[in-house]
Amino acid sequence: MAKKEKLIDAYIAKSADFAKPILNHLRKLVHDACPEVEEKVKWGMPFFDYKNAPMCNMAAFKQHAAFGFWKASLMKDKSLLETAQSETAMGHVGRIASLKDLPSDKKSISWVKEAMKLNDEGIKVSKKTIAPKQEIEAPEYFTKALKKDKKALATFEGFSPSAKREYLDWVTSAKTEETKLSRLTQAIEWMAEGKKRNWKYEVK
């Protein structure tokens, strides 16, 4: 049986209650499909490697979880990429808020086995093959708030596109103005301290 990474145990333990059963279920499915899987934490999230190469990964956020494949662009089921491009959630199966949002176990396992085969064959994904997400333009209220705090502005400008998107998605997805303001205030505070959106899950 593959060794389980303690950092992933800790990641799941720190996740929101709704996300724990989702992450545990995804983890079990990957292990069932690929007994030789290697668990690792990269970029602050759980990754599942096979044959010394990334295979798939999962992540938990405040209100949803995500699951994605490193070589989704090379897999037969093109809906994986289509879903990723149409969703603001990171991952290839959309926003996962409960176990019922997951594809069937049979389908998920078939995806993992296909990803395994790609790694067995040593096929690599070029930067051109990976379809990048379109960058979100920061709304005016977000930009104005940033400009009032020089440290936060400097941090944001130094972020990678994906790190910027995490904050923008979080703030702009708020359903009420009160929540939006609260998230924006928290975002500015964290960025002033040089922190990414999911800094709590980063490996020190």
Image (cartoon, helix red, strand yellow):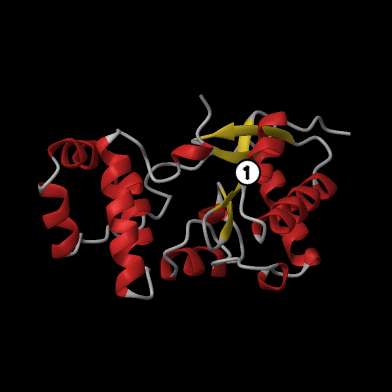
Coordinates of residue 76 in the picture (x, y in percent):
61, 62
Q: Answer left or right for 47 relative to 88.
A: right
Q: Residue at x 16, y 63 (%)?
A: 141
Given residues 169 and 178, the one toward you in this image is 178
Side of 144 where 181 appears, left or right: right
Quarter placement of the N terminus? top right
Q: Is residue 160 visible?
A: no
- Residue shown at 17%/36% (left/top)? 154
Locate residue 49 relative to residue 195 in the image: left or right: right
Nearest the viewer among 13 and 54 is: 13
Residue 193 x, y percent position in the rendering:
30, 33
Q: Quadrant of residue 189?
A: top left
The secondary structure type at the circle numbered 1 is helix
Number of numbered discs on residues: 1
Which amino acid, mark 1? Lys
Name the side, left or right, on which 122 lies relative to 63: right
Rendered view: 142 above or below 126: below
Which residue is label 1 attached to?
Answer: 14
Residue 3 coordinates in the image, percent (x, y): 81, 29
- x then y, percent, for residue 88: 41, 64
Residue 153: tell me if it is visible: yes
Q: Residue visible at 79% across and 64% down?
A: 105
Tell me: residue 169, above or below residue 101.
above
Question: Which quadrant of the structure image shows residue 144?
Answer: bottom left
Q: Residue furthest right?
A: 1
Farthest residue toward the top? Answer: 204
Within 10 Å of disc 1 (Cα), the crowding (few <14, some 14-19, many 20+) is some
Give the residue displayed 37% in from the left and 69% down from the top. 174
